Image (cartoon, rainbow, N blue to C red):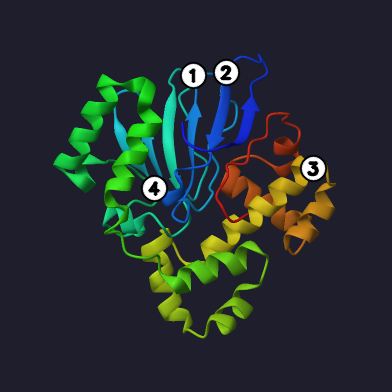
Amino acid sequence: MTGRVLQKTATNRGTAVYRETAPHPALADRVVCTWVDPARPRPQPVLPDACIDLVWDGATLEVAGPDTHPVPIDGDRTYVGVRFRPGAARAFLGIGSDEVVDARVSLSDVWGDRASYVQEQLLERPQDAVGILERALLDRVAVAPEPDPYVRGLVDLLARGTPLAETITHLGVSERTLRRRCAVAVGYGPKTLERILRFRRALRLLRNHRPLADAAYLAGYVDQAHLTNESQRLAGLTPAALAARPSLSISTNGCN
């Protein structure tokens, strides 16, 4: 596995560990991390993070599209993946991110025979799954176009908590144009992106034991009820229920 470990999350049993690792340096501006999630109890679903992942579950290789709701994960399987930075996956996949939003799509449907070759390697050498996935991306990095600069600016500003209206003014582009470009690059429009990044700020505050009302205010919500409603939509749980989980996990997305 390449790079340094970014995050480890142990289960209550203290045996299986979810681990994120920095990607190959040549991929670092497009890829947040590689990760391994061993078979283990998974009381928390995967929460929206504005990212697209390539995921190998030991049998199938899929594109995990950008989520707008919580996704339950089978605890009996080990997963290995590569997580793209928000807006960066399209350059490697060759399709708009809006085509895979809230979906799990076989990589063969996107890459054709090239994906079949990668999957054969994974079946032959499952112990080298991370390296195989990284090499598949390294083979394409030289021809992958640069991410949309407007979308990159949008992500950076929203991740810092800049209001959307102010962000659009700063970028100097029309709201309609930005909405279209964001949907193609990220999977959905700027308003949904803002909601997801704001919720992640609140989650980090809650994990650091900030009171619910403080977390709502500091993350940019109108009030505590606003945060509670968004938590139900994006996580399927109240923020209080999430905060009460000692294993509350916030995946690395490279921006917030």
Circle 4 sits on which residue? 65
Q: Position of residue 145 (x, y in %)?
A: 32, 64
The disc at residue 183 is none
Amino acid on which disc 2 is placed: Ala
* Left or right: 23, with 90 as reference point: right
Q: Residue at x 57, y 48 (%)?
A: 234
The disc at residue 208 is 3
Q: Position of residue 152 (x, y in %)?
A: 49, 67
Q: Earlier in the sequence, mark 2 or mark 4?
A: 2
Disc number lying in front (2 or 4): 2
Q: Residue at x 25, y 20 (%)?
A: 124
Q: Is residue 103 visible?
A: yes
Q: Nearer the viewer, residue 8 or 99?
A: 8
Q: Nearer the viewer, residue 225 or 101?
A: 101
Residues under numbered marks 2 and 4 in contact, where contact means CB atoms less than 8 Å apart: no
* Left or right: 238, with 168 as reference point: right
Amino acid on which disc 3 is placed: Asn
Q: Secondary structure at mark 4?
A: loop
Tell me where residue 217 sits by quadrant.
bottom right
The disc at residue 16 is 2
* Left or right: 172, with 247 as reference point: left
In three-dimensional space, the C-alpha distance between marks 3 and 4, rounded to whole angstroms, equals 29 Å
Q: Position of residue 186 (x, y in %)?
A: 43, 60
The crowd level at tag 3 (other Cα within 10 Å; few <14, some 14-19, many 20+) is few
Disc number lying in front (3 or 2): 2
Q: Nearer the viewer, residue 238 or 13?
A: 13
Q: Give the quadrant of the C terminus.
A: bottom right
Circle 1 sits on which residue? 39
Residues under numbered marks 1 and 2 in contact, where contact means CB atoms less than 8 Å apart: yes
Q: Earlier in the sequence, mark 3 or mark 4?
A: 4
In three-dimensional space, the C-alpha distance between marks 3 and 2, rounded to whole angstroms, equals 23 Å
